[in-house]
Image (spheres, rainbow, N blue to C red):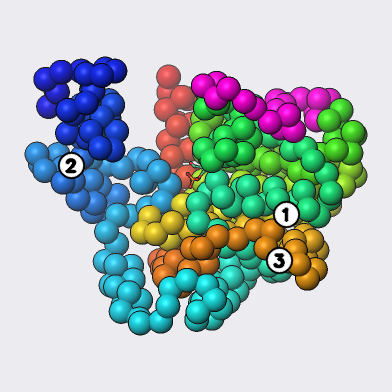
Amino acid sequence: MKSERAPDGDAAHGSRFDPVNPYWETFLDDAGLDMTGARGNGCYIETPDGRVLLDCLAGFGTANLGHAHAPLLARFAHALQHTSVNVFPFECAQSQLALASKLLALSGQRFQKVFFATTGAEAVESAVKFAMTATARTDVVAFHGSFHGLSMFSSFMTGNPFWTEALPWKPGNVHHVDAASFAALEDLLSSRKVAAVVFEPVAGSSSAQHWTARTSARLAALCRSTGTKLIADEVYCGLGRTGSWFGFDAIGMDGTTGGAVPDMVAVSKGLTGGLVPLSAVLMNDGDFDAVFGAPGKAKVQGSTFGGNRLAMQCGLIVLELVESGRLVENAAAMGELIARSWRNASARA
Ligand SMILES: Cc1ncc(COP(=O)(O)O)c(C=O)c1O
């Protein structure tokens, strides 16, 4: 399915994707990824030319129930029939309450508030705004190799210059360190200018590198001792993917061994099974009140579609289906199976 001419510079115009992104044509053709007309079916993608592909990316982490999950589609179709207004504050409070309560229950009530946003990047940026407001500090630390999204500030938190090198500006308040380099981290945090450290318990990109119980406890202790908020970006690794509901639990950062859990956790992707955009930040009362607790400050963060009813209902349906299908336990079992197969294969090699 090669295109007849390479969409290169001006020549790109005239490609079948012209109004959206003409450069896709060669990229998709070269990668054999033209999925026009493809159908999702569980963990498979069925292409119009008869190929059945195993979607190892699970819809970039969104399809935690699989593609075209019939019970999800049926229940969401039912939610679509409601005639109540979809955006806040018209009838959203009830659906927000239901989903927030569910998320807090899944976290074992280790957080008390949920702030809803739309994308993963927006959730991470929202968490940073809460941290900056709560600490009255200006700076943020993230890690080399991390990915936090591509909105303006999240691009600069992302620890790979590939995503920002084309931009002629960068903020002066974002610092990157190596996850292995506590000395650099201690140095930065001792300045007491850092509002938040943002980390991925298990990296969505960067070969799924993960923190350990020991290194994450040290990270949390350092944040506590310097009054720095610790934000777990679980946009990719959260909500069951690691075999635990939260990635920080999967790495043993469960607060039971003297260590602390993160101050805030951002989740998205699998929250609505890939149907509608939704993200959420779990946090404690104190950090929430820093933004919403005082009259006149309540507009510091929010968006038109943040917490919209359809997204709330979809999120609740997905979490219930993941729970009733015991999919978190299944992820743990599958992870163990894969790890065991690798161990056996490398022992044989
Ligand atoms: C860890 C992590 N954080 C943030 C994001 C950004 O999410 P979104 O693309 O929904 O803005 C991603 C997206 O892949 C991610 O993997």
Residue 242 shows in the view? no
Disc 1, SS: helix
Q: Position of residue 109 (x, y in %)?
A: 69, 69
The label on residue 130 is: 1
The label on residue 298 is: 3
Spatial CA span between label 2 and label 3: 44 Å
Tell whether position 167 is magenta: yes
The label on residue 36 is: 2
Q: For the residue marked with disc 3, what is the amino acid?
A: Ala
Of the 4 image quadrants, the one containing the C terminus is top left
Q: Is residue 48 left or right of residue 198?
A: left
Q: For the residue marked with disc 1, what is the amino acid?
A: Phe
Mark before the other along the chain sequence, 3 or 1 = 1
Spatial CA span between label 1 and label 2: 41 Å
Residue depicted at 42% across the width and 78% down the height? 85
Looking at the rendering, the stretch of residues picked out in magenta corresponds to 165-185
Disc 3, SS: loop
